[in-house]
Amino acid sequence: MPRPTTQGGFANSSGSVLEGTIRSVMASMGFEAVKYSDYVKHPERYGTELLLQNVPYRTIYGHEGKTEFLLVSSEYNLRVRIECKWQQSSGSVDEKYPYVYLNAVEAMPEDHILIVLGGQGAKKGAIDWLKQTAAKGRYGAVAHGKKIEAMSLDEFIAWANRTFRG
């Protein structure tokens, strides 16, 4: 596969590494990665411990959006939506954090949402704002009964270890 040559190409490639790492972590915990579009056509073909990919929802703007993953577990009685954001160098991804957060609060149907952040390029204060906002349940998260967590990839791995390995 050729190396990316544009800023957008590098960002997509780096974001794919973040998503691939999440897939690997969840596979090591016994979860099967399945495209959401395949799952909804034939759910009987799959088990009960799934990492669904490219999961749609209706955004706060009223159009179709997708998040990278929906973790579904019968064994642990979980439905956790996982949104990934990679920011390796300066750019606009961190400016989208409020939009991502408000979608988690108002538009994503699950009660538990993880926002997994990667890279070191976010503007000073952006990640802290998102983590603190999520931790305090601001902007209606508590009223909507949502648990929203913003975390680094390392923190995600620790979360998965605590949640699925006890």
Image (tube, rainbow, N blue to C red):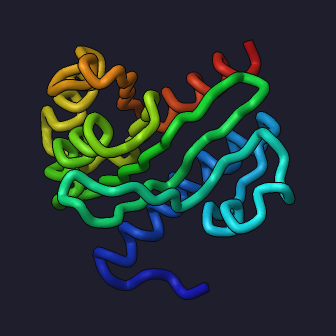
Q: Is residue 123 above or below residue 40?
A: above
Q: Is residue 82 above or below residue 43?
A: above
Image point 51% across, 63% down: which residue? 16
How far from the left and from the top, in percent, is residue 79? 58, 34
How far from the left and from the top, in percent, is residue 86? 37, 53
Between 17 and 57, the residue placed more toward the observer is 57
Is 46 placed left or right of 4 in the picture?
right
Between 41 and 102, the residue placed more toward the observer is 41
Of the 4 image quadrants, the one containing the C terminus is top right
Is 45 placed left or right of 160 in the picture?
right
How far from the left and from the top, in percent, is residue 154? 51, 32
Image point 47% across, 69% down: which residue? 13
Image point 65% across, 64% down: which residue? 35
How far from the left and from the top, in percent, is residue 99? 19, 48
Is 60 placed left or right of 54 in the picture?
left
Image point 36% across, 27% down: which residue? 148
Of the 4 image quadrants, the one containing the N terminus is bottom right
Total numbered labels placed on residues in the image:
0
